[in-house]
Amino acid sequence: MIRCNLSSVMVLDQQKAEDFYVGRLGFVKKRDVPAGAARWLTVEAADGSGVELLLEPAGMDFARDYQTALYERDIPFTQLGCDDVKAEYQRLTGLGVVFRGEPRAPAPGMPLMATFEDGCGNLILLVEG
């Protein structure tokens, strides 16, 4: 069976991204390996049960253009999950995380969702369930 074990999110500053994803979201650093002028830097859920998230530098012009286009159109770069979106919204708001609105279900039968800024050039969709 094939499964996803690594996903990436482009970031403008790897140290700032590490500080945010570890210090505010609660991920733990998994790998930190020098890779030229950057790092192979991954984080994962604190319980170790999730997919590694590569905090990948948006070093190429086309990567920054793509990231900027998504951000300007209010399109999340990726989706993260949690058990209770309202509780995470409250916790993260208290830590200074900027949300684009309060948690809501976009349609009947859909889970609660909230979009936040990661401070590294991305919008991230937080989904309950």
Image (cartoon, grey):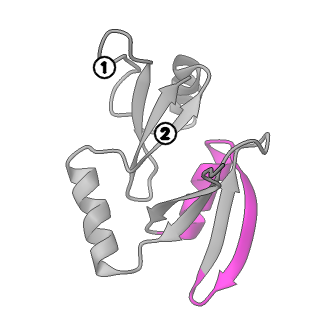
- Residue occupying image coordinates x 56% and y 88%: 37
State the residue in front, 92 or 45: 45
> What label sits on residue 35 in the rendered view?
none
Q: In the rendered view, does 64 fall on the left or right side of 73?
A: right
Residue at image position (73%, 58%) is: 29
Q: Give me the residue at 42% from left, 25% from top.
A: 113
In which quadrant of the rendered view does residue 10 lie? Answer: bottom left
User: Marks 1 and 2: in contact by CB < 8 Å?
Assistant: no
105 sits left or right of 51 in the view? left
- As measured in the structure, the alpha-carbon distance from the residue carrying label 2 to the one carrying label 1 is 21 Å
**Residue under circle 1?**
106
Residue reaching furthest to the top: 108
Quadrant of the rendering where the C terminus is positioned: top right
Looking at the rendered structure, the number of numbered marks drawn on it comes to: 2
Q: Which mark is residue 97?
A: 2
Residue at the outermost front position: 1
**Tag 1's secondary structure?**
loop
Q: Magenta segment, which residues?
A: 13-38
Residue 64 picture location, percent across and down: 32, 70
Residue at 75% of width from left, 41% of height from top?
49
Q: Position of residue 19 (x, y in %)?
A: 62, 57
Q: Local crowd at mark 1 within 10 Å, few (<14), some, or many (≥20)?
A: few
Q: Nearer the viewer, residue 49 or 87?
A: 49
The x, y position of residue 47, in whole percent, is 79, 39
- When the figure is inspected, residue 122 is found, relative to residue 79, above or below; the finding is below
Which tag, 2 or 1, sits closer to the chain's start?
2
The picture quadrant where one finds residue 39 is: bottom right
Disc 2 marks a residue whose amino acid type is Val
Kindly report which numbered mark, 2 or 1, lies closer to the viewer in this rendering: 1
Mark 2 crowdedness (10 Å alpha carbons): few <14, some 14-19, many ≥20: some
Residue 37 located within the stretch drawn in magenta:
yes
